[in-house]
Amino acid sequence: MRARILYHDRCFDGACSAAVFSDFYLKKVHPGAELALTGLFHRANQLFDESQFDGDENAIVDFKYSPSAKVTWWFDHHQSAFLSPEDEAHFRADVSGTKFYDADYRSCTKFIADVAGERFGYDSSSLAELIRWADIIDGARYESAEAAVRMPEPAMKITLVFEAAEEIMTAKVIPLLTSYSLDEIAARPEIADCFERLYANHLRTIEVIRERAVDSGPVVFFDLGDTGLGGYNKFIPYYLFPDSVYTVSVLDAGFRTKISVGSSPWAKSEPEHNLATLCERFGGGGHARVGAISYGPNELERARQTAELIVKELSSPPA
């Protein structure tokens, strides 16, 4: 028995979701199964490649729904989980008992642990630390913007490695997540060395954003499209501009051009705009409090135009 697990790559919750599902699958579904891991990214005009579903069973966790008959397990918690109304109707009609969706969960990791426990008798207590931190990180439940930016905890260090390492590290670390503590993983030489290098870049990125950011009241906007930066810690704007409510940024990641849209977990007033709904209008999606839009490579000007429209809309009360 060979199971293919597809997960949201360069994402702490995606990695933890894959780890918890792997543990559940081996303990409650097919003990002794061979597991294969595949990371997925959000891209423009995204369609699943059927050749990715090459296992005897195929699972997608923390990522959009596929109606493929080859997909036997699915867990997600994003508002924008479905690529089309037809995909959502396909899910609603499913009677397999192995596909689950709940947008009220902060993290897909906890969602998997809870469903697997309630439906299949899975005991996730050995992974309690992992599940707790996935909920903190994906739910942006840090005690402060400073803590989110300074990254004192092992889980935060591992998150930076997942999100920013030149070599994609997620698939290498996922098998460790079920056998070692986060502190032990963060202390491994290959992780610790990578973090130190990335953290130095992170500190430089703070200064780049400080220089480029335009603070227009509720919205902080910055364009990193010509900087060579493919990503940044999404809490930097709220650390630098604590009175901001929303942030909008443009990035050129090479294989895609990305507009990131977020809201501050520490905003003095509750954000009024649903950012997933807003991003869906431009082909993106996400959660109510954070979303993104992916365009193709070499579409930087299009991304800038879209970002300008979003900044304008977020600067006004919702209609």
Image (cartoon, helix red, strand yellow):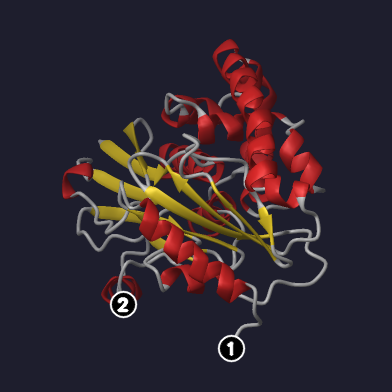
CA neighbours of label 1 inside 10 A, class few (<14), some (14 to 19), many (20+): few
Across and down, in percent, residue 159 comes to 59, 35
- Amino acid under disc 2: Pro
Q: Position of residue 170 (x, y in %)?
A: 46, 31
- The answer to which quarter of the image holds residue 192 is top right
At x 77%, y 30%, the residue is 152
Is residue 47 or residue 88 the one in the foreground? 47
Residue 138's spot in the image, x, y percent? 61, 50
Camera-side residue of 318 and 56: 318
Q: Which residue is label 2 attached to?
A: 85
Side of 54 relative to 244 (left or right): left
Q: Is residue 174 visible?
A: yes
SS class, disc 1: loop
Q: Quadrant of the C terminus?
A: bottom right
Question: Could you tell me which quadrant the N terminus lies in?
Answer: top left
| 91 relative to 111, above or below | below
The type of residue carrying mark 1 is: Ala
Residue in view at x 80 percent, y 60 percent: 243
Q: Which badge, 2 or 1, comes first in the chain's sequence?
A: 2
CA gap, disc 2 to disc 1? 24 Å
Residue identifier under label 1: 319
Question: Mark 2 near mark 1, Cβ–Cβ under 8 Å?
Answer: no
